Amino acid sequence: MGRYIAKRALTSIITFFAVLVLTFILFRLLPGNPVLLLFRNPQLTQQQIAQLSAQFGLNRPLYEQFILFIVNVFRGNWGLSFYYRAPVTQVLFPALLNSIILILPSTILAILIGVGLGVISGWKRNTLTDMAVLSSSLVLYAIPTFWLGILLIMLAVRIGGIPVSGMLSIGVSFTSPTQYLGNLLRHLLLPMITLTLVTLGQFSIIMRTSVINELTEDYVVAAYAKGMSESRLIRKHVVPNALLPTVSIIAISIGTVVAGAVLTETVFSWPGVGTLIYDSIARRDYPVLQGAFLIVALSVIISNFIADLVYAYLDPRVKYS
Amino acid sequence: MSDHSTLKRYLGNRKGSLGLAILVVLVFMAVLAPVISPYKATQIDPTAILQPPSAKHLLGTNEVGEDILSLIIWGSRISLLVGFLATFVAVLVGTAVGVVAGYIGGFTDEALMRITDFFLVIPAVVLAIVVAAVLGNTLLNVILIIGLLSWPSTARVVRSATLVYKQMPFVEASKCAGAGTAYILRRHILPNVLPLVYANTSLTIANSIFTQAALVFLGVGDINDISWGQILHFAYASGAITAGDYWYAIPPGLMIVVAVLGFALTGYALDEVLNPKLKAGVVFESA
Amino acid sequence: MSLLDIENLKVYFATRAGIVRAVDGVDLSVGTGEVLGLAGESGSGKTTLGYALMRVLPRNAKLDGRIIFEGRDLLSLSATEFNRVRGREIAMVFQGSMNSLNPVVRVEDQVAEPLILHGGLSEDEAKKRARELLAEVGVSEDKAKSYPHELSGGLKQRVAIAMAISTRPKLLIADEPTTALDVVTQAQILRLISELRDRFGLSVIMISHDLSLLSEVCDRLAIMYAGKIVEVGSKVEVVNTPEHPYTQALLASIPSVERVGEDSTSIPGEPPDPINPPSGCRFMPRCAYARSECKEFNGYLYELSSTHRAACVLVGGKPIERVPR
């Protein structure tokens, strides 16, 4: 198991390094003077430009610039947001926290519901139950995140009383932590429903396929021949095995979850990294965009690594090797 | 799909026929847009601003007085075009990478597969947003970006199929007869591998349509090209959503759902028909 | 007295191509403490017969006939009622032991499971008993906590057997119990099964394509071809005086030490299409002695002795009373 984890960790590190290379190339492709583009501050004096150029090594050869870029990334020196006039990291980390508040519960909920529905669907395959679960999963998979958000907003506006934008009511001073939390949760409701629904469809389809594949395995017949109920067979034998391929595929699709999160945040103006990306495009705030991309890529890589650990924990063939 | 029985089996598949029917309708809609659309897409009716559906405007109008139904019909062109062209790019790259990795093997395979995994893992939509923002918002850029981010799944499918076919006797025979690598790839490997790509292609189109809509909605891509995502972008940006103008917001989204479902169903059905599972499974007694 | 009487058993599968008659009117009985060998080529329906006795068949299967086990017709039991027979009174060792163990469950837990299901034992008691059982079949204590992938093929097969006999069933169905094992391990597994029979009076149906292997351990032999029994008798009768041309061909195809140098003849031709079997005798298209009467033959088993029967027009004896339809 130690070797497996070490190998996966190494892959993650290499992937992150590749992301750094990609980011470096991408943001050097910007036309125009990088300093003017990166800082877009018309009030910059010649002296400031020179100073910034030196700090980010923009007057050096490309390979030196690259090394400096890497060093700066690891030092937490991610540049300055021209819009906020503050270091990118200071802009980014509160947004990241807000994103986690939305994404973490939604993803956990989507996995629990999606996997559960997939098990039922695969077990009862080709029955009416299966048809119902599979069709709704397919529709959820096909619904654009932002459109589902739009539908929920229209519904919420009609019902009234449910916040459809932001994370907290503006201009309200909260008298107690419970009041604050209650307000936050009310704002969280719609974005969380949206993200959970669009994510669980694919999880349910993956788990269904996985369960159906396991049901063709010899060990399932052998276990059933011991004289147990179907539900015990599914619970004790099929699900623990069907989870393995599901975990690997969920790991690969974490990128899709992140994309869904970006769209959800934008539609509901949830002040997370997604909304920050959206705003930064409009503001041409490239340092923030670059930082946001790095942080998103890093989160996906870390989530993948966690999925690898979960896999190793679930599969004795990896755990005890 | 060349032989008759495969076609028959496909049409016997309920998912497959539904998917195919959707695709036929969509393609007709895009091709015949000038004929079936009640108005020109950008024709403005100044007397009808944000009007709910009526006999004159079956799906109502938007905030500048354009006919929603006409916008949706014309919008199918860009949505489908991006779907098809981006997928073409993806399949081209994916097939090339997959065949080369699978056939040559060794270090080349290892390196190409690492790159494939990298593109599989990084959040494609976010990268697409960033790249489009940096490189500029033209339609061609959007097509290229989506295409160049969607090839990994095709590459994987093609690679595993190539690994199977390169062991086949006819490839060995061809090698002994002195055929070059390029010839073997073109004559023996590709014709056998391509049917496996069809199912994957269909799913890639679905994903491309999806991604394009998402990008346009976020304002990435040419905001003047009419597409379903673009209509939704303006519906959201103009405040029609919070005003409850359902006729403006519901139809374009519904079109995306239907199109994605159409391609996805076709893909699943092709997969079932072309790559049947050998084992029947299902162990429970009939009782 | 027989423990199991199979009467006119039919297992049909509804497929897109048509009805597959996998088992098509089989009569067979197994006595207490008897080892019956069931031989046939792949596709002859022998494995399906085993699955039918366990009632673990795909949904598209249709069962007909009677399976009388200790006086009860198993096919008339409800699914819940049969759950108390399956794995408790009748157990099965499946073909390919490598795949018949759950890869993510420790082997002692897999052996303990039937004891929890049927024996009413607590989890701890069942595990303790499972370790004893594993020791009985030759899997040492330190291996009991292993996962299947950590064991050799022979050990996995022993675990599969321990799993099947844990509840002391009366009938064990062993489907190709020794395939994919080396010769030494094969012999050990066969000896283990014989021992279990001797110690517990276990009845065994051993299914295999390998007639020589079956003749080593079985008391009686039944030969199956295209869903039907074509010959059945004591081991001596079937091996020394085979009456059905198919049995003769099967025996001739065994390479043996006494006949080194002679060609071991494989049977020419292909087994018939299970959807459209030939009318009359199903072996006729491949039979060296085929003649015109064979076309009208209706599958009678002719009585050659009180224990020996064969289904061929060339056989002299008289048809037995109950005629398989």
Image (cartoon, coloured by chain):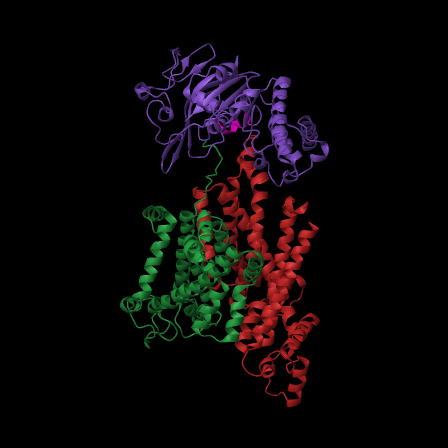
Q: Is residue A17 above or below residue C213?
A: below
Residue A86, how many percent across, how many down? 65, 78
Residue ranking furthest to the right:
C142
Q: Is residue B68 left or right of residue B239?
A: left
The tint of chain C in the picture is: purple
Indicate the position of residue A219 as horizontal and vertical percent values. Answer: 56, 36
Question: Could you say which quadrant of the image residue A273 lies in?
Answer: bottom right
Which colour is chain B painted?
Answer: green
Q: Nearer the viewer, residue B55 or A279?
A: A279
The answer to whether residue B65 is seen in the rendering is: yes
Q: Is residue B158 magenta?
A: no
- Taking the view exactly as shown, the residue that stands out farthest to the bottom is A46
Q: Is residue A235 above or below residue B90?
A: above
The residue lying furthest to the left in this view is B35
Res A255 quadrant in image: bottom right
Instruction: Identify the residue at horizontal 32%, vertical 48% (top origin).
Output: B4
| Quarter location, residue C206 | top right
Q: Which residues fall within the magenta stretch?
A: C78-86
Check the rendered structure and report the hue given to chain A. red
**Does residue A53 appear left or right of residue B58 in this picture?**
right
**Residue A321 spot, x, y in % from top left:** 68, 46
